[in-house]
Amino acid sequence: MSNELHPPIFEDKSLYIESMDLDAKGIGHREDGKVVFVDGALPFERVRPNVHRKKNNWEMASLQEIYKESYSRVTPPCPHAGYHTGSCGGCKMQHLEPSAQIAVKQRALEDLLEHIGQVEPQNISRPIEGPNWGYRYRARLSVRDVRKKNMVLIGFHERKSRYVADMQVCPILPQHVSDLLMPLRQLIESLDAREHCAQIELACGDQVTAMVLRHMVDLNEEDQRKLLEFGNQHHIQWWLQPQGIDSVHLMPSTLDNSPTHFPEQEKTLAYALPEFGVQMPYRPTDFTQVNPYINQVLVSKAIQLLDPQKSETVIDWFCGLGNFTLPLATRAQKVIGIEGSDQLVQRANENVEFNSKLRSPSAKTAESSGSGSVFAFCPVTFLSQNLFVITAQQLLDLEHAHKWLIDPPREGAFELVKALAQLIEDRTSALIAPSKIVYVSCNPATLARDAQVLVQAGYVLKSAGIINMFPHTAHVESIAVFTRT
């Protein structure tokens, strides 16, 4: 493709791309001001769009031709990436140079803070980055038995399609998992239940790679044997999901009518946070440890920013399994983790108990070496509370905390920050507002909305920046720090 303008015959059909939206579409304006979203186009390019959907104020288009190419455009390393029919829809930004991807995401965060939240951070924090490839330790791979071609497909969906892409490799998955895509096809093709396998949920721990097979009929003993033998050969731990998410269970390491033993099934799926001496067991269906490189840096950075003291109580809102709670418990006087599910609270408590048993010898060793028991836990309490309907009174009923860490899902923490703002505004309230809040967000739009509430309540947005948790995708995660004098 040339960097020169196309001959004038196409000038009336060209469009200048000014920016990129959160769905990785290039944005341009026609002369009449109408917005055009162009799939595959990059900022500062002049392109010819192929419009396929029109509304009064905007149009949707695909990229038909590039007249002037962006210097940030690169050839996607993955052979399945692109904007043609049949290409994988897992990555939308592989055609954009990685540092430019980060710049686009940072700009998106700043724009949303300004336009939705009407706030501006005092400082833009440096992006939290990790490897651009082999980072995705959690993924959901669809399985389709294509009888017309006598083959099974395993992978992500095609772009804007319900069909499964014909993936043979995947550079964003760990290398050992990418290498298994074709052997996995052969395995499923060999099963009697091949037509009834819907998906494989992937979770990679530090020592274990687990796969959850969603199967719509019961597996006979021969199919189970094939799964276990494959698992032992390739170091895969199999879990089964015959019905809904609650039916997920670990396959036994032996079969009913056979003494054959499969030790791969007995390993614990877990990841470590070495800086804090924490081990986090989890199930393959838990949304945790998606990107281990980023997770370790993020936990360290968030706790560094929060700066909990040995005299302080900290609340970890939307605590999940305790990914932040347990590390915080090595720094604070007391930590309270709050989550909306009784089941998650129970499992978070189990993780504290698991670590407490592991840590006793380490603490004694640390003390005897003169370094002090830096890994000793402070008291940790987990509570179950629906945080999407929390009221000011419920917040007031909680123990006072000096600092907060908030890590909500995409919906954000609107009711929580509203309840806090209400108590701050009520000068008769007994609440002592937290002096610092670190907010980890997976949706910059809801972060911006919640930031406006906090700033109007008297907080200062000290800093904000992106977390590049999902390179080559348009997903934006971020971290913000709020202080109160």
Image (cartoon, rainbow, N blue to C red):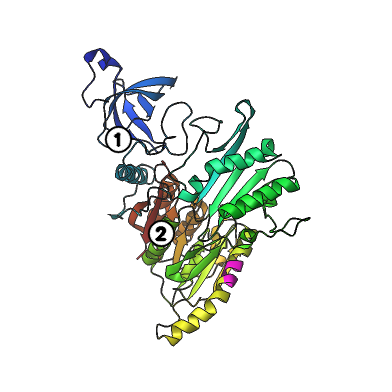
Question: Which type of secondary structure does the marked residue at label 1 adopt?
Answer: loop
The percent position of residue 331, horizontal first and vertical second, equals 44, 73
Which quadrant of the rendered structure holds the C terminus?
A: bottom left
Identify the magenta region. 349-354
Residue drawn 31% across and 41% down?
97
- Dominant secondary structure, magenta: helix
Q: Which quadrant would residue 483 be assigned to in this image?
A: bottom left
Q: Is residue 144 visible?
A: yes
Q: Which residue is mark 1?
A: 73
**Towards the viewer: 65 or 184:** 184
Q: Earlier in the sequence, mark 2 or mark 1?
A: 1
Q: Which residue is mark 2?
A: 298
Residue drawn 55% across and 67% down?
398
Question: Which type of secondary structure does the marked residue at label 2 adopt?
Answer: helix
Q: How many marks?
A: 2
Q: Amino acid at mark 2?
A: Leu
Crowdedness near tag 1: few (<14), some (14–19) or many (≥20) residues, C-alpha within 10 Å:
some
